[in-house]
């Protein structure tokens, strides 16, 4: 399908063919008919990408600190590679569109195929022929609102949220500074609230348009504005000022302070400098609010991505309900958007539209609409390179990748490439990341669905690197096709799914492998060697300072991610099982105290019991200092001790002496893990982790979650 993308490194905007997005739980697939380019907002987004690294570093010191921290813990080379990867990725543009529902995912009851809808959300309602939109970001169009009007839904909700925050009452005098698209909608909304409206802008044509759309008085921005507003308000000043500009200048906020009445209200809806002039704001005792986009729910992953709505009685106006209200006003004829449309382009002409926004054509614009041929059959498979091998060849590892997230890009694919693997088909949920990653690693094709990857006869290794809830299902499908499978942890999220995977693996000629990479690290293997001939149990103390995940992160969702015990702690359980070399039989979990910013049960203490009497204690905390290295393991047995410090260094103690081992760079075993995977594919070598061990590790995480809930020690196989 066609989609508008921007390269993060060059800033160039292009229309490219991208695989159609896959239908997901809680989402709606929409065939786009129209989408809106906001001259102010999207111009700012494009210009941000075009800034130099030095400029961006000055504006975002938090990102600089994050890069420095990453380099400290993971090494300079890995950090540079990660930054380069981000710079070469594509950014989807657009956040307001309208179209026709094609399919609805599980847990979606409010929509059906054929519904006409408005769609919202950066990364969801993009300029693309087919959209995958969470249900809370879709609104059904009223019968007499066309698709062009529906495409204004998001922008209308942004304006409406700003108006709500200004709390206008009938007859109040309100000033709008900035009469771009957002300002013009704000003028009309204030007029619909029964307010007197004064509009200010640098552009005289926009000032005139605002007057035509309901502004009682207007003025071109300048030194006389204060006197004009005071005269218009009978010497009292404005009851409320809404700043809807798109500028870095501090002038709009200074002007807002000068024209407001005593105890007036100022709401910033657009972008402006925010160096608050204390004298005017103090003297008038002004209140200042910064509007947060299009309403409650914005930036809340649980609302936007997971579909958890706020109770209507307690949160009357969410972003979805703001869009509904805006569309209702369009339907009634209270608002007009047609006069705001300055240009229309077909999707294949989108590059011209962005040249217009950038000022390259020296042509004024306001609302720019893209139109789509909803009858055109969009491409589902995008050819990227010639196939490296023909079906039936057996002398090469040929990878089919499902999921193209950060770990796949930064770790799995570089290691597979270094090991000599070739790449066949790649699929991701959005299609954009599949295209970027596919081009970078010379995949033969980018496809729309996981089934397309699994059914590609040219590949002999399926790598599953999706979100956790799909791991088991995809592994079963690939194993049933007798493909070798590498699944990123975790293997499954519940006992039933785990049983299905293990059963499929037992009956397949393909081998099941899980990304428990730490057991392949050189330091972990040295530790195993030290205790290889032991006859007494081991005692293991493992500390992980994992850091916090934000509330609402998909890993914490019980359906998508399963939580951090299942999603990450499986790594450390597997590693302790590797060192003991015998079956894990029981586990007990207890919650550790967490601060107010942490997710409940992110910090836990686990006690593991093994069949030979060995014991492991895992302390997993999320609220430690970021400067502390993430992992430390101490293994004791038969008078010897082995200590691993974050897989960068180790100390081996025996016979009263210490032997220090220091690696050149951190090595968590990914390189040797991928080499082992390739050996399995090429010569049929057995995977060094048995199905029993894979099942025991995964099942132990389920029992840990149960133990955390009940407070009781749980047997692994019960």
Image (cartoon, grey):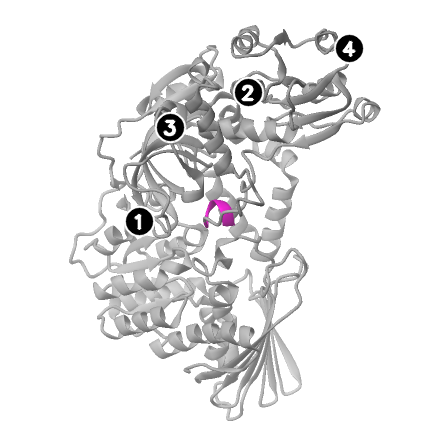
The spot of residue 718 in percent (x, y) is 42, 83
The local secondary structure at tag 4 comes to loop
- Residue, disc 4: 235
**Looking at the image, which is closer to me, 475 or 285?**
285
Alpha carbons under labels 4 and 2: distance apart? 24 Å
The spot of residue 11 in percent (x, y) is 47, 29
* CB-based contact (under 8 Å), mark 1 and mark 4: no
- Residue, disc 1: 426
Alpha carbons under labels 1 and 4: distance apart? 66 Å
- What span is in magenta? 302-306
In this rendering, which labeled residue sits more in front, label 2 or label 1?
A: 2
Residue 182's quadrant in the figure? top right
Which is more N-terminal, label 1 or label 3? 3
Alpha carbons under labels 4 and 3: distance apart? 52 Å
Which is more N-terminal, label 3 or label 4? 3
Q: Is residue 159 above or below residue 199?
A: below
- Residue, disc 2: 192
* CB-based contact (under 8 Å), mark 3 and mark 1: no
**Looking at the image, which is closer to me, 629 or 228?**
228
């Amino acid at each position: 399908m066609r989609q508008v993308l921007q390269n993060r490194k060059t800033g160039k905007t292009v229309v490219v063919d991208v695989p159609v997005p896959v239908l997901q739980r809680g989402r709606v697939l929409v065939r786009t008919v129209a989408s809106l380019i906001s001259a102010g907002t999207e111009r700012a987004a494009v210009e941000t990408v075009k800034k130099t690294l030095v400029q961006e570093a000055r504006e975002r010191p938090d990102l600089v600190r994050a890069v420095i921290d990453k380099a400290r813990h993971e090494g300079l080379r890995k950090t540079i590679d990660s930054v380069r990867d981000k710079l070469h990725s594509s950014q989807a543009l657009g956040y307001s569109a309208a179209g026709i529902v094609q399919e609805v995912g599980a847990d979606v009851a409010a929509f059906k195929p054929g519904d006409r809808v408005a769609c919202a959300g950066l990364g969801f309602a993009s300029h693309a022929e087919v959209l995958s939109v969470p249900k809370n970001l879709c609104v059904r169009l009223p019968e007499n609102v066309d698709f062009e009007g529906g495409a204004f839904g998001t922008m209308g909700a942004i304006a409406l949220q700003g108006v709500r925050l200004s709390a206008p009452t009938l007859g109040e005098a309100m000033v709008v500074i900035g009469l771009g698209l957002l300002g013009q909608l704000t003028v009309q909304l204030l007029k619909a609230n029964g307010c007197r409206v004064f509009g200010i802008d640098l552009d005289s044509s926009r000032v005139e348009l605002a007057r035509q759309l309901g502004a009682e008085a207007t003025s071109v921005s300048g030194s006389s504005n204060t006197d004009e507003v005071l005269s218009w308000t009978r010497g009292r000043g404005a009851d409320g000022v809404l700043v809807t500009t798109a500028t870095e200048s501090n002038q709009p906020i200074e002007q807002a302070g000068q024209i407001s009445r005593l105890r007036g209200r100022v709401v910033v809806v657009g972008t402006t400098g925010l160096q608050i002039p204390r004298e005017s704001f103090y003297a008038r005792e002004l209140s200042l609010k910064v509007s947060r986009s299009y309403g409650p729910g914005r930036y809340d992953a649980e609302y936007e991505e997971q579909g958890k709505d706020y109770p209507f009685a307690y949160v009357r106006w969410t972003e979805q309900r703001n869009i509904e209200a805006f569309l209702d006003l369009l339907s009634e004829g209270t608002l007009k958007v047609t006069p705001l449309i300055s240009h229309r382009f077909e999707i294949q002409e989108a590059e011209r539209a962005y040249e217009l926004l950038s000022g390259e054509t020296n042509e004024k614009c306001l609302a720019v609409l893209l139109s789509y041929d909803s009858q055109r059959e969009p491409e589902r498979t995008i050819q990227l390179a010639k196939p490296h091998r023909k079906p039936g060849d057996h002398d090469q590892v040929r990878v089919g990748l499902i999921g193209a997230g950060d770990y796949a890009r930064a770790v799995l694919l570089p290691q597979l490439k270094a090991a000599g693997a070739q790449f066949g088909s790649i699929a991701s949920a959005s299609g954009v990341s599949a295209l970027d990653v596919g081009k970078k690693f010379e995949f033969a094709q980018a496809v729309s669905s996981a089934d397309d990857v699994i059914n590609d006869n040219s590949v002999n290794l399926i790598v599953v690197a999706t979100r956790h809830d799909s791991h088991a299902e995809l592994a079963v499908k690939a194993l049933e096709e007798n493909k070798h499978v590498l699944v990123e942890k975790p293997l499954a999220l519940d006992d039933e799914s785990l049983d299905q995977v293990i059963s499929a693996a037992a009956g397949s000629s393909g081998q099941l492998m899980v990304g428990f990479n730490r057991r392949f690290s050189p330091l972990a293997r040295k530790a195993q060697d030290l205790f290889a001939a032991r006859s007494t149990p081991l005692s293991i103390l493992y500390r992980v300072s994992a850091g916090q995940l934000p509330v609402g992160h998909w890993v914490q969702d019980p359906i998508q991610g399963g939580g951090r015990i299942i999603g990450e702690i499986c790594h450390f359980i597997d590693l302790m099982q590797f060192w003991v070399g015998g079956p894990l039989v029981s586990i007990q979990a207890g919650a550790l105290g967490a601060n107010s910013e942490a997710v409940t049960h992110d910090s836990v203490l686990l006690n593991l019991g093994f069949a030979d009497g060995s014991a492991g204690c895992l302390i997993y905390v999320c609220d430690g200092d970021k400067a502390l290295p993430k992992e430390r393991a101490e293994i004791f047995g038969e008078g010897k001790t082995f200590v691993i410090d974050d897989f960068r260094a180790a100390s081996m103690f025996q016979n009263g002496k210490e032997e220090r081992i220091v690696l050149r760079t951190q090595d968590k075993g990914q390189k040797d893990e991928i080499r082992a995977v390739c050996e399995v594919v090429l010569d049929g070598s057995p995977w060094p982790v048995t199905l029993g061990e894979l099942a025991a590790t995964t099942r132990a995480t389920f029992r840990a979650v149960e133990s955390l809930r009940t407070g009781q020690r749980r047997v692994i196989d019960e």
